Amino acid sequence: MATEIEQMRTLPEAGDHYAVEEIDGIELIDKLATLGISAADVKKAKDAGYHTVRSLLMSPKKHLWNIKGLSEAKVDKMLDAARKLSGEVVFITGGQLLELKRSVLKITTGCQAIDALVGGIETQCVTEVYGEFKTGKTQLCSTVCVTTQLPTESGGGAGKVCYIDTEGSFRPERIAPIAERYALSPDEVLNNIVYARAHTSDNQMDLINMTAGLFAEEPFRLLVIDSISALFRVDYVGRGELAERQQKLGAMMSKLKKLAEEYNIAVLLTNQVMADPSGQMFVADPKKHVGGHIMSHASTCRFMTRKGKGDTRVLKVIQHPSVGESEAVFQITNGGIIDAED
């Protein structure tokens, strides 16, 4: 514990910028005015949730055509200006891609066993953690809310956190002992967590759209949604509404992937599980995560948590771009998740 504390620096005062040079590279759509786009049209795009040049270029035209007050001609003109401003390059070499990937940060989970396995929670990625009740999903999120605010040289992301809570499970009082574990001010850490409570799946999507405005203005490094599926299971019931539910869940996941890449943030999602609808009786674990193939394809990394021996928990790697299926054991403490004691 002493080693962890000695390596940490005190967090800047709430409201201070962590690394302005990192967000200076984001091209805000306000700059389109220099290429003949009216301020009124720029405002309409911003009101619809498009705050950067890249967000325009990453969106289908049919979505931009739905922006109130923007005609197809205006959208085309705006996209042409966005391409000029961004200096968009369609193809790059593998070496150039490798260089771009150097900007990816790996945020410590607080557990060395997990970090040794997967390197941490990565920015520019969507990470899904699913499992039964009381298997450590929310505790992992709470820990990463704190470690994200550490300096990058200490395994953090040197940025702020946005937390969208769909189940009312976030407890701010849990943050204080975790912050103290890393010699950080609990008040400053809490003030650098922006929190919102979602009550419907539509409200959840609205909040996700609002985060783009936050990320364009300040150096955020983590977006947590706990959980991604809870409200969908309530709002869409039965097989008759399954297709619509999956379609909207897919659109939400697409938006999250774009946010992760656009702003170099880590998106950490928890997910619920359900009984295997295939009815297979003779399998080791008949539970599946909610969302099916939509979630499987949209998540970059997928982990499953379960109860282990005694008071331990197990995190299993289900899907990861550079790690095969493997497991790490951890414990939940007052100071967040840690390595399991022998």
Image: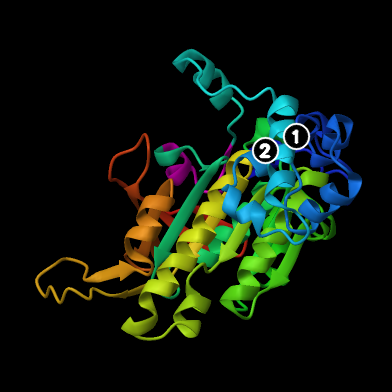
- Contact? badges 1 and 2 (CB < 8 Å): yes
Percent coordinates x, y for residue 232 in the rendering? 48, 76
| Segment tinted magenta in the rendering | 106-116
Any part of residue 148 in sight: yes
**Count of marks overlaid on the render:** 2
Percent coordinates x, y for residue 338 in the rendering? 52, 53
The relative height of residue 72 versus residue 157 in the rendered view (above or below) is below
Between residue 220 and residue 9, name the one nearer to us: 220
The numbered mark, 1 or 2, whose residue comes first in the sequence reads 1
Residue 35: which disc? none
Residue at 51% from the left image edge and 42% from the top image edge: 120
Residue at 51% from the left image edge and 18% from the top image edge: 92
The relative height of residue 159 versus residue 88 in the rendered view (above or below) is below
Q: Which residue is mark 1?
A: 26
Q: Which residue is mark 2?
A: 54
The amino acid at mark 1 is Ile
- Report helix, strand or loop for mark 2: helix
Tell me: 145 left or right of 13. left
